[in-house]
Image: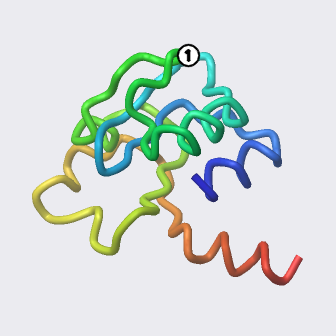
Amino acid sequence: MVSAALLAEQGAKVVGIADWKGGVYNDSGLDITALLEHVKTHKTVAGFAKADPLDPAKLFGLDVDVLVPAALENQITADNAGQVRAMNAISSSRMRQRRCHA
């Protein structure tokens, strides 16, 4: 969620997020502020009312400009690399590092 919040602050349209319990998608862009409140209460993005449910395995196949695998290491593997449609993939650890130095 940190990566999504940082990207949204910079004007990016975040359309999909997945966590340990599920995923959410909104082609028009997720309301990150409302989603953060939902996660604070429910400890997951699953069930967020302002988005459609998304199977976390389908997150990599979304037609997006940037993919940010942020939760765990080794998110993109030989098994799912062929599904990635994003033109760029960015490690979220780099985003956190930049934020600390800003």
State the residue in front, 41 or 8. Answer: 41
Above or below, comparing residue 13 to residue 19 in the picture: above
Q: Judge from the rendering whether residue 79 lies leftward or rightward of residue 28; answer left or right.
A: left
- Asked which quadrant contains residue 2, the reply is bottom right
Q: Residue at x 63, y 41 (%)?
A: 36
- Asked which quadrant contains residue 60, the reply is top left
Q: Which residue is drawn at 36% across and 35% down?
A: 23
Above or below, comparing residue 36 to residue 13 in the picture: below
- Asked which quadrant contains residue 55, the reply is top left
Above or below, comparing residue 101 to residue 60 in the picture: below
Q: Where is residue 11 in the image (x, y as percent from the top left)?
A: 80, 39
Q: Where is residue 66 in the image (x, y as percent from the top left)?
A: 54, 48
Q: Which residue is drawn at 23% across and 43% down?
A: 83
Q: Judge from the rendering whether residue 64 lies leftward or rightward of residue 6; answer left or right.
A: left
Of the residues shown, which amino acid type is indicated by label 1? Lys
Where is the C terminus found, in terms of image quarters? bottom right
Above or below, comparing residue 80 to residue 42 in the picture: below
State the residue in front, 70 or 46. Answer: 46
State the residue in front, 66 or 15. Answer: 15
Residue of label 1: 50
How is the protein colored in the picture?
rainbow
State the residue in front, 11 or 53. Answer: 53
Q: Judge from the rendering whether residue 25 lies leftward or rightward of residue 6; answer left or right.
A: left
Could you say whether the residue bearing mark 1 is in a helix, strand or loop? loop
Q: Which residue is drawn at 79% across and 80% down?
A: 100
**Mark 1 Cα-neighbour bin, 10 Å: few <14, some 14–19, many ≥20:** some
Q: Position of residue 45 (x, y in %)?
A: 45, 37
Q: Position of residue 7 (x, y in %)?
A: 71, 50
